[in-house]
């Protein structure tokens, strides 16, 4: 579609939305400022650049697929990331895990990392006009092989991981200062057990004590912000997970930090969307891990499905966009990884846009006056509105490929740049 066609379609879409009292120009302006933290770990199947034994247990998460082209070095990962960002409208963030440091082939254990190993990423981010977020990596390491880290009954193990997380928080603050944007440090640990666990109270007590020590140090919120991520179960931790939702809700309230809601971490019929308006009664902000579980926490690339739409409808309906930090979390090694990133980022932005295009005032008026028929009817009418025309115009304005043009760009890059990776 050429530019004049996109503009013409947009003009007619603008009129249609206007009839419902929605200002599409305003929607585009708001959407252009939405920043999403993209998960670096989809680029290399959560391997990172440490020089350690690869045989360590993955810690309850599982990358599936063997599609060729995974990034093997920092340079390859950065090149793949740049390509992905060039196809995504807006200014975004990159979410790093501690294992992605530039260790130069040295064997630096996790209790010894410092900001030095991340300066290369900071320089690169400055060049690319990106902000960074950070995560402690408490899995895929010999000291996590028992299945327990911060809640281990072994004090040596706990102390090792406490030191790692403390350093990760310091590094986050350093990143935040350097890039002049608060770096979100998210903590997820794999702790749990495959089978019936008797000492659940003790493990959680130990976890609480470890976190008391970790969060006794505070940082300015302009430098870094903390989040804690719960989970229902993992592979190999089906019967017990120490860091449950209730546990971390308590921690978040207690330490005045954020909870992280990962869309794959709840019962399959539980709505993550419905959690937003509860949690934000008690917390200033929260972190999202936008993901797509298929039958389990499978971390498929994100698509514009009802779950995603409902999530952002809840956020926009409550006027909560500014209080929600959006990050992606998936790792799919069965498809082109750059394509996976771009599908997921574009779909997440589409979900935000679709929510912003809702005539909130009119729907609320129907609800307030008990006109539930009209509320339902209007919600149904919205489903066939010319949403795609607004999206194309947004992409055009943001100077990224419109429609499906980006698909061939990914395929070309695959042929030229990553075809010879083994
Ligand atoms: C695991 C959590 C966690 C990880 C990333 C790699 O179940 O979702 O967020 O996926 O930190
Ligand atoms: Zn997650």
Image (spheres, grey):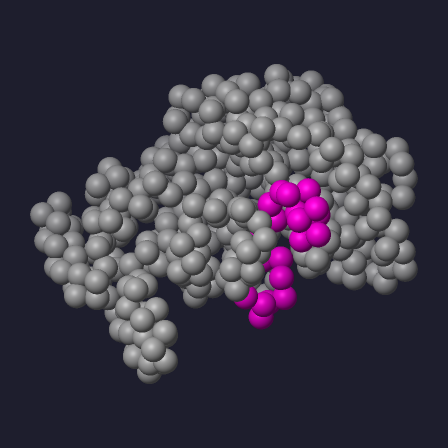
Residue 202 in the image: state x and y as whole percent.
88, 51
For residue 339, which quarter of the picture?
top left
* Viewer can see residue 212: yes
Viewer can see residue 70: no
Relative to 195, does residue 72 appear above or below in the rendering? above
Residue at point 71%, 52% (across, down): 250
Q: Residue furthest bottom?
A: 373
Image-based side of 276 in relation to 195, left or right: left
Instruction: Indicate whether residue 259 is drawn in magenta.
Output: yes
Q: Is residue 63 magenta?
A: no
Residue 304's x, y, as percent? 40, 59
Q: Which residues are magenta?
A: 248-271
Residue 380, image x and y in percent? 31, 74
Instruction: Please tell me in which quadrant of the rendered image residue 150 appears.
Output: top right
Estimate the x, y position of residue 232 in percent, counting from the top left: 69, 59
Q: How many marks?
A: 0
Q: Quadrant of the C terminus?
A: top right
* Name of the residue lying farthest toward the front: 369
In the shown orientation, is residue 97 left or right of residue 56?
left
Residue at screen point 90% across, 39% down? 154
| Residue depicted at 30% across the width and 64% down the height | 361
Instruction: Specify whether 59 is left or right of 72.
Output: right
Report the side of 209 relative to 227 (left or right). right
Q: Tell me the residue at 40%/21% (across/down).
A: 127
């Amino acid at each position: 579609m050429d530019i004049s066609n996109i503009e013409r379609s947009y003009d007619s879409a603008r009129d249609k939305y206007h009839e419902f009292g929605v200002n599409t120009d305003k929607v585009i302006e708001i959407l252009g400022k939405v920043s999403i933290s993209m998960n670096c770990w989809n680029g290399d199947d959560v391997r990172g650049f440490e020089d350690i034994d690869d045989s360590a247990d993955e810690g309850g998460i599982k990358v599936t697929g063997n599609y060729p082209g995974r990034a093997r070095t920092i340079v390859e990962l950065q090149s793949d990331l740049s390509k992905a960002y060039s196809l995504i409208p807006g200014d975004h963030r990159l979410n790093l895990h501690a294992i992605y440091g530039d260790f130069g082939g040295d064997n630096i254990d996790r209790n010894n990392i410092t900001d030095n190993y991340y300066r290369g990423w900071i320089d690169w981010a400055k060049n690319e006009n990106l902000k960074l977020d950070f995560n402690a990596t408490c899995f895929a390491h010999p000291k996590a092989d028992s299945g327990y880290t911060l809640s281990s009954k072994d004090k040596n193990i706990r102390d090792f991981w406490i030191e790692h997380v403390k350093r990760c928080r310091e590094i986050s603050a350093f990143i935040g200062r350097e890039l002049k944007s608060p770096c979100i440090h998210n903590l997820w640990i794999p702790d749990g057990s495959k089978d019936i666990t008797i000492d659940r109270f003790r493990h959680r007590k130990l976890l609480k004590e470890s976190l008391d020590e970790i969060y006794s140090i505070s940082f300015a919120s302009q430098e870094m912000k903390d989040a804690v991520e719960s989970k229902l179960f993992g592979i190999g931790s089906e019967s017990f997970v120490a860091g449950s939702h209730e546990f971390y809700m308590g921690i978040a309230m207690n330490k005045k930090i954020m909870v992280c809601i990962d869309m794959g971490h709840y019962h399959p019929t539980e709505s993550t969307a419905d959690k937003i308006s509860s949690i934000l009664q008690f917390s200033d902000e929260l972190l999202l891990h936008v993901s797509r579980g298929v039958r389990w926490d499978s971390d498929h690339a994100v698509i514009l499905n009802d779950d995603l739409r409902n999530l952002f409808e809840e956020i926009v309906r409550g006027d909560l966009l500014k209080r929600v930090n959006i990050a992606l979390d998936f790792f799919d090694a069965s498809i082109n990884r750059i394509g996976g990133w771009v599908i997921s980022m574009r779909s997440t932005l589409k979900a935000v846009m679709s929510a912003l295009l809702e005539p909130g005032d009119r729907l609320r008026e129907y609800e307030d006056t008990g006109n539930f028929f009209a509320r339902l009817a209007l919600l149904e009418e919205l489903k066939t509105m010319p949403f795609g025309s607004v999206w194309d115009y947004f992409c055009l304005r943001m100077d990224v490929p419109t429609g499906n043009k980006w698909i061939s760009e990914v395929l070309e890059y695959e042929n030229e740049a990553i075809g010879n990776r083994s």
